[in-house]
Amino acid sequence: MITAGQQGFINKALPIFKRDERIAGAALGGSYVRGAMDEYSDLNFIVAIMPGHVDSVMAERHEIAEKLGTLLSYFPGNHAGLPNMLICLYDEPLIHVDLHFIPLEALRHRTEDPVIIYERGSLLTDEFAREKASAPSFDMQWAEDRFWVWIHYAANRVARGELFDVLTALSELRVQILGPMMQIKHGGIPFGVRHIEQLAPEETPMLEQTIALHDRKSCIRALKAATDLYIYLRGANKSPAYHREGAQKRALQYLSHISDKFSQDS
């Protein structure tokens, strides 16, 4: 359930959006859409900008964010491919808030139907009616083309003793490939490893095996577990991708070679 602090933040934001004539409306996405809000949830605002005012709003988005509450820190969402988003941390209450500023006409291209909390006339409703929301796609060929190259790379880093780099590679494999493929298998949205524990509890132990300690043997075991899980998920999802059988064979052979070479390491 939404907390009093979260609702209070929404209530304070609404009149600020309404007073700015450049803003066509606002909606809430994420957990709010699914009715799954709890005390640990972020607030994900979609702020729609009227035509002709995108540049001015984007230039002043920090000032808009400051009006909504006690803004402790913020940064743009470039790392997630969302440069128009401000990722913010507010105080009183301490809360994470995403402010995604987008042109009104861009609302039709969306992965979910956010809950409209304010709109001028029916501007947001009309845009949502133009196209249905569609879940983001995941390119199985993209994954197949990269997976075995990354396994070989990580095995090399094991041999060099660059184990922090291996731990990073394993994390990237989970976020970019294994997690999304598990999401797809269970009908979820292929986005990292969000909600994996709830969506696929019976397979979570398989993903846990891809987590390593800062230790050669542990890293090798985790890489082997990652290859096993990838092959399993590729089959379970009936992947239409062209299988890089040569790359798979040689990468697995090389990983086995590295395992044998350092089998006596403590």
Image (tube, grey):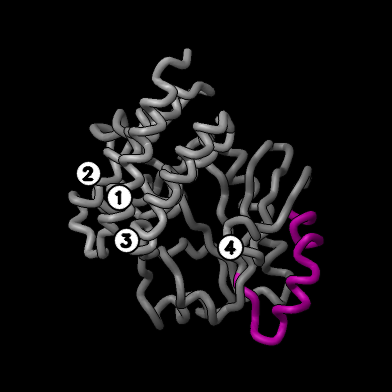
Amino acid type at circle 2 is Tyr
Q: Residue furthest top?
A: 266
User: Does residue 247 show up?
Assistant: yes
The residue carrying mark 3 is 140
Marking on residue 153: none
Instruction: Say which element carries label 4.
Output: loop
Say whether disc 2 or disc 1 marks the residue closer to the N-terminus: 2
Asked if the residues shown at circle 4 and circle 2 are in contact, with their CB atoms under 8 angstroms apart, the answer is no
Lateral position of residue 117 relative to residue 71, left or right: left
The residue carrying mark 1 is 248
Say whether disc 4 or disc 2 marks the residue closer to the N-terminus: 4
Asked if the residues shown at circle 2 and circle 1 are in contact, with their CB atoms under 8 angstroms apart, the answer is no
Give the residue displayed 81% in from the left and 61% down from the top. Answer: 63
Choose between 163 and 69: the one closer to the eye.
163
**Which region of the structure is painted magenta?**
48-68
Is residue 96 located in the magenta-colored stretch of the structure? no
Say whether disc 3 or disc 2 marks the residue closer to the N-terminus: 3
In which quadrant of the rendered image does the N terminus lie?
A: top left
- Viewer-nearest of discs 3 and 4: 3
The residue carrying mark 4 is 81
